[in-house]
């Protein structure tokens, strides 16, 4: 699985077509790698990370995610894609210029790239 995480404008709008590309074997691995992108979110438990991101993108009226972690990860990614915060990319897409992987913890799941 591959996704592109879109950066935001100063007023919080996603910028389609650019951003960090992450590849992983499972939706849960993608969410874990997303969480580790920032030292601030990297300290949060995964469930709290998902909730904080949805609070930012959907507001306080957001629907709760499933109690099942795998189902919650799938729904989390789907909801972010629906709001153009991420986009799903074809698995066979050629990788862009590689970035050095300094984070050993995330290296087991994927390689991240920016455009």
Image (cartoon, rainbow, N blue to C red):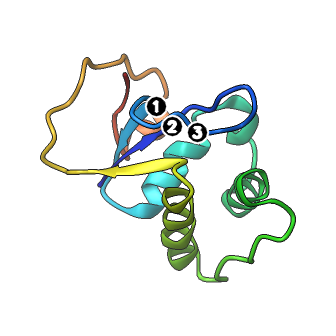
How far is mark 3 from mark 2, CA to CA? 6 Å
Between tags 2 and 1, which lies in front? 2
Instruction: Identify the mark nearer the N-term, 3 or 1.
Output: 3
The residue labelled by disc 3 is 14
Q: Position of residue 83 (x, y in %)?
A: 57, 56
Give the SS element for disc 1. helix
Instruction: Identify the mark nearer the N-term, 2 or 1.
Output: 2
How far is mark 3 from mark 1, CA to CA? 29 Å
Residue 54 appears in which quarter of the rendering? bottom right
The residue labelled by disc 1 is 104
Between tags 3 and 2, which lies in front? 3
Q: Residue at x 70, y 64 (%)?
A: 47
The residue labelled by disc 2 is 6
How far is mark 2 from mark 1, CA to CA? 24 Å
Give the SS element for disc 2. loop
Q: Position of residue 72 (x, y in %)?
A: 58, 74
Q: Dots 3 and 2: beta carbons under 8 Å? A: yes
Residue 50 vertical position relative to residue 40 in the rendered view, above or below: below
């Amino acid at each position: 699985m591959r996704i592109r995480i879109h950066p935001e404008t100063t007023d919080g709008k996603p910028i389609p077509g650019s951003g960090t590309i992450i590849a992983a074997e499972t939706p849960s691995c993608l969410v874990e790698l997303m969480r580790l992108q920032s030292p601030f979110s990297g300290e949060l438990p995964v469930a709290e990370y998902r909730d904080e991101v949805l609070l930012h993108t959907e507001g306080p009226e957001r629907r709760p995610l499933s109690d099942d972690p795998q189902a919650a990860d799938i729904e989390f990614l789907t909801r972010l894609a629906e709001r153009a915060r991420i986009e799903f990319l074809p698995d066979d897409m050629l990788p862009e210029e590689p970035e050095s992987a300094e984070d050993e913890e995330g290296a087991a799941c994927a390689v991240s790239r920016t455009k």
